[in-house]
Amino acid sequence: MAKQNTVFKDAFNRCLKLLAETSCLPSEPELGTTLGVSRTTIRAILTRMEELQLLAWDKRTKVVLRQPKPEDYYPPEETDSLSDIIERSFMRRILAGGAEPGMQINELELARDIGTGTTSVREFLIRFSRFGLIEKRPNSHWILKGFTREFALELTEVREMFELRSAASFAALAPDHPAWSELDRIEALHHEILADIDNRYKEFSELDERFHLLVHTSSSNRFIVDFYDIITIVFHYHYQWNKTNARERNARALEEHLDYIAALRSRDPARVEAACRRHLRSARETLLQSIQ
Amino acid sequence: MAKQNTVFKDAFNRCLKLLAETSCLPSEPELGTTLGVSRTTIRAILTRMEELQLLAWDKRTKVVLRQPKPEDYYPPEETDSLSDIIERSFMRRILAGGAEPGMQINELELARDIGTGTTSVREFLIRFSRFGLIEKRPNSHWILKGFTREFALELTEVREMFELRSAASFAALAPDHPAWSELDRIEALHHEILADIDNRYKEFSELDERFHLLVHTSSSNRFIVDFYDIITIVFHYHYQWNKTNARERNARALEEHLDYIAALRSRDPARVEAACRRHLRSARETLLQSIQ
DNA sequence: AAACTGTCTATTGTGGATAAAAGACAAAAT
DNA sequence: ATTTTGTCTTTTATCCACAATAGACAGTTT
């Protein structure tokens, strides 16, 4: 088992959806661009579709024979990339399980646990180490530094510096910059969710990420944008874990966002700074409260 | 060849220096602590020393038989860890060689070039990617983003934010904090080097790193401290490459440091900020000048 | 009793092998 | 004259094996 063909399976599933909507599929390069995979994978998909009698394929003609049935799809657990599986598994261990700071992390044990080779686990840990939650002792184990109060404070300190800077440059963006229309769309979504908050408050998490990423991107600084990955992953797993008062917290954050958006539109630096600080302060409080 | 025994060879060389200074070596655990390796490696070293008739070893007695000769040492090229070799080789390629932004990086080719396995190259690239100079296309190659003017500007922008913050917290450190005495030592070295600048200006690079790292460390923020790694590696390889006016540049930077140090001692926030900004501005100029 | 040594086991670092996926290039079709 | 397809080569992702290194434990020495 050198490599799982998850790219193929995932692209196949997505291609089934395309197939459900037309009577014949486009050219191989076009499909490749649409699905974001190479022609090699596209041809494997087409071959499989032919086998399943979904498609009559001969050179350029790709005629749909029947609608896809549920059993044509690959099960979702087979389409996850190995690194996603490792990430989820690892985060569950360190966030949910009793993971005390200072604990040792054992590559081999992790690999056995997840049912994978050590190389992939190692590469994951190396990539993950930039989040500041683990640290390597060369020729020896990794150390879990833990999701502690200090971690949260250090994280938010940098976040605040970066976001204040980014918000200031956002307000200075040219009026025809595409970010403004993305901001319009984001604002509209805020209103939509607020109007039906009881049912839709769970959509906040994703919208929050989209909004803050937009702000950070306007800094045009790769280090600032990259740092937002850390925020994203921390909040992502955190939301799954801590759900007390989610509705109230999210409603409040949405209001703060609207305020923040209005400040950005005003292009008044002092107002932007005030709104940004206000929101970041309450975001920090939320994070800290959930830690102990 | 599963693993090069560079840890052993390097520790052996360092142990030879210890051996040259005493008539008998201490216990295995003590040696392990001193050299920073495990007892397994210590015992390998002692065995080798016995073979070379350097030592009479029987349980606790480890009597030195003769002084080490130059040929007892392992050659320095055999004591470098593989990741150091890969790093140097890679940096030479992207800084010296005609490395245009957008160029593809090929793991296999790099590995063949360096004469190593692909796994090690891959792990190096993953670790290196946090420096923002390369980017991965999943299932495909890496892209060199290049050591460009934009890179330098983005890097220094973050550096300035972080260092201003760190300098402010340094000035607020308790008077008995160990950082103050380290600052004294660093200041003394500045005076020493300035007094003999024509001969010793090359020592600046290392002292510069030591000084700024001390400042950054006082932020007590792992993200700020970790970020300094990027600065370090960029300046490290940069100094090796660009040597025009090194003497003048270094002398000027040393003077700025002294000013900056005096400001820190004054604990006057306004003065600290001014001195820090002044120095960072000239550091940025130096870096930018060397780029094109 | 505390520290040290002998011995043994477990884990890490690294090269090599292999299926999956990307991608190059010429021939074929519009 | 593009765009598409058929075919082939190259590269990446991943597992596995094994030497180097770390680390555990019991017996031994001071």
Image: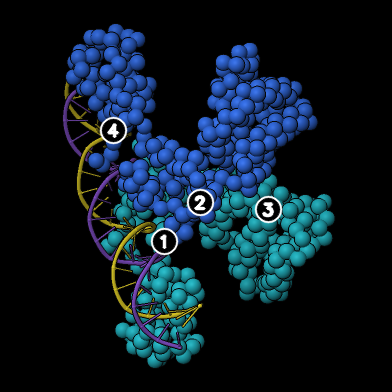
Chain colours: A blue, B cyan, C yellow, D purple
The x and y percentages for residue B203 are 61, 69
Q: Are marks 1 and 4 on the same chain?
A: yes
Name which residue type carries label 3. Ser
Residue toward you, A29 or D2? A29
On screen, residue A102 above or below B133: below
Q: Quadrant of residue A53?
A: top left
Q: Earlier in the sequence, mark 2 or mark 1?
A: 1
Foreground: disc 4 or disc 2: 2
- Give the spatial CA distance, label 3 vs label 4: 46 Å
- Give the spatial CA distance, label 4 vs label 2: 32 Å
Q: Chain of mark 2?
A: A
Foreground: disc 2 or disc 1: 2
Q: Chain of mark 4?
A: A
Residue A33 is tagged as none
- Give the spatial CA distance, label 1 vs label 4: 33 Å
Mark 4 residue element? loop
The x and y percentages for residue A211 are 60, 26
In this rendering, position of residue B290 left or right of residue B265: left
Residue toward you, A227 or B203? A227
Mark 1 residue element? loop
Quarter placement of the N terminus of chain B: bottom left
On screen, residue B70 above or below A97: below
Residue toward you, B240 or A273? A273
User: Pointer 2: what residue?
Assistant: A144
Question: Count the marks: how many?
Answer: 4
User: Pointer 1: what residue?
Assistant: A139
Residue B219 is tagged as 3
Mark 2 residue element? strand
Name which residue type carries label 1. Asn
